[in-house]
Amino acid sequence: MVTSKILRFVRKLARKSGNVVNRVSVPGRVLLNVGDPFGPEQASQNNLSLVLRACSHAGIEPLYVESENPQTAAVFLHEDDKKGFFSAAAALWDDTLGAEIAVKGSSSKRVRTAEGLSQMVGPQVSSVSICRFYSIRNKIPKFNWRYATRVTFYRKSDQWLEAISGERMTPRVFGEPEQIKARLEDASRRAIDRIKFDIDVVYTWVDGSDPEWLARKAAVEGKSSAANKDANIRSRFENRDELRYSIRSLLQYAPWIRNIYIVTDRQTPRWLKEHPRCRIIDHREIFPEGSALPTFNSHAIESVLHRIPGLSEHFLYFNDDVFLARPTLPDVFFDPNGILKVFVTQSRIPQGPLVDLRSSAEYAGNNTAKLISERFNLAVRKRPKHAPYAMSKTLMLELEREFPKQFSDVRSSQFRSPTDISVATYLFTNYALATRNAVYGDIDYQYINISGNSALGVASTLENYYSKPAPITFCLNDASVGDSRNWKKQHQLVLRFMSELFPIKSPYEK
């Protein structure tokens, strides 16, 4: 019974993962190959290009094009150009396209044929959103209405220009006819509520099966008597290629990320190729003199992330088991003025005297809460979500100046120990809140615990993911403290799960 359920899950994923021909048309969508470097940005740009091509064929000059964010592109046309645009779009139509037409005073309608599009032209049509449907492998469309380009129609007179629907943020543009174009150009400038600064992503990564890394670890293990009981468990260093699929999720759902940095100890993922936007950062590049290297302590590694050369002022810290699962904008993590957003759970930090049964994370959380309490007379109660952490180089440098001994001590601890502080997850986030550099944010998040001792438990957990709407981010975490599991079966199940969700190869892969 156990075996049959696991097999059903594996076969279910295998059916969704069949080999396909590169970029061929199938009824109703364009089918992409797994190796195609294709994502939301390309889908959105293709939809915008199609709309502008229809305008060109009809001899229409758009009032202006809003394309600052490729995932929310918009084109603004005069109402008089509506019929010409619909006719030109219908002439370019094929069965991989769709249109969602908004009618003032009525619900929107979706059409998938040129004939259906032509029949929708009317005075009350306020906008039309056009998209091409794409699919990875032979499954439901991956890039659809979410990436459509919206065409909004404006009415005009001698003194004003107004959208047929008042849904736009600036429904009227007042002035003489010659002033209208200038005001529309002003309206198309980058809005004050849009994030203007660069954002990088930093990963910490290890391959716990690397013989050279294992030799370095073995040479240190006997010297670390103060380490926590869970400091050296296998799951803490296990590599299932999560990093490869987490990066794919970034490219697919957050194409606005500038650069990616992977912090590791003399290791490089076997699948990674050299690329100027994805760099390996060795521990020796960023740990200051006097630090204990090699280190196998993630708390120590997190204390030096801000020392990466060329890192943007604002950056996101990802563990390699954290993924994005739907299109995400920078304002999920930062406000336009640079304020950071902190995501916490309702789970409380254990209070009271420390005991040796607690995990290394709980020791570090308690130690950090004590620091914040002593510095600000504020109590830290809630745990952070295991999600991307919004961070700032300037604030990390300030932290390092504020708590020099604690930073030095954690960098001297080669394995997690009861005296550690948790720099990124507890100290930074709560210090940022206390100094008014951060606010509490809200993020749709799912924590997937794969630490079951049987392959059946892992299969059931992963299959359950499909029963819920996709969150913005999820963590595929193995919190096991024992090693009594079937690693090979678990690895196969997790790998199939990740490859099903993120099949598009990134440009950083060989």
Image (cartoon, rainbow, N blue to C red):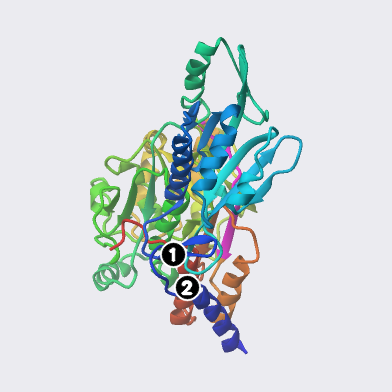
Above or below, 73 relative to 35: above
Give the structural element (helix, strand or loop) at label 1.
loop
Q: Residue at x 48, y 19 (%)?
A: 186
Instruction: Choose the circle earlier in sequence order: 2 or 1.
Output: 2
Quadrant including the C terminus = bottom left
Q: CA distance from mark 2 to mark 1?
A: 9 Å
Mark yes or no: residue 372 visible. no
Foreground residue, 425 or 203?
203
Q: Quadrant of residue 153?
A: top right
**Residue 14 in picture, x, y percent from top left:** 49, 77
Q: How many marks?
A: 2
User: Is 401 inside the magenta-drawn segment?
Assistant: no
- Residue picked out by circle 2: 17
Q: Please tell me which residue lies in front, 283 or 35.
A: 35
Q: Amino acid at mark 2?
A: Ser
Residue 492: mark in rendering: none
- Mark 2: which secondary structure? loop
Q: Residue at x 23, y 46 (%)?
A: 289
Residue 203 placed where, x, y %?
38, 53
Labels 2 and 1 touching (C-beta < 8 A):
yes
In the rendered image, the vertical position of residue 4 relative to residue 345, given as above or below: below
Q: Is residue 182 left or right of residue 208?
A: right
Q: Position of residue 53 (x, y in %)?
A: 44, 40
Amino acid bearing label 1: Pro
Residue occupied by mark 1: 503
The answer to whether one can see residue 29 in this image is yes
Q: Residue furthest top?
A: 176
User: Residue placed at 50% from the left, 12% from the top?
Assistant: 178
Which segment is the magenta one? 437-448
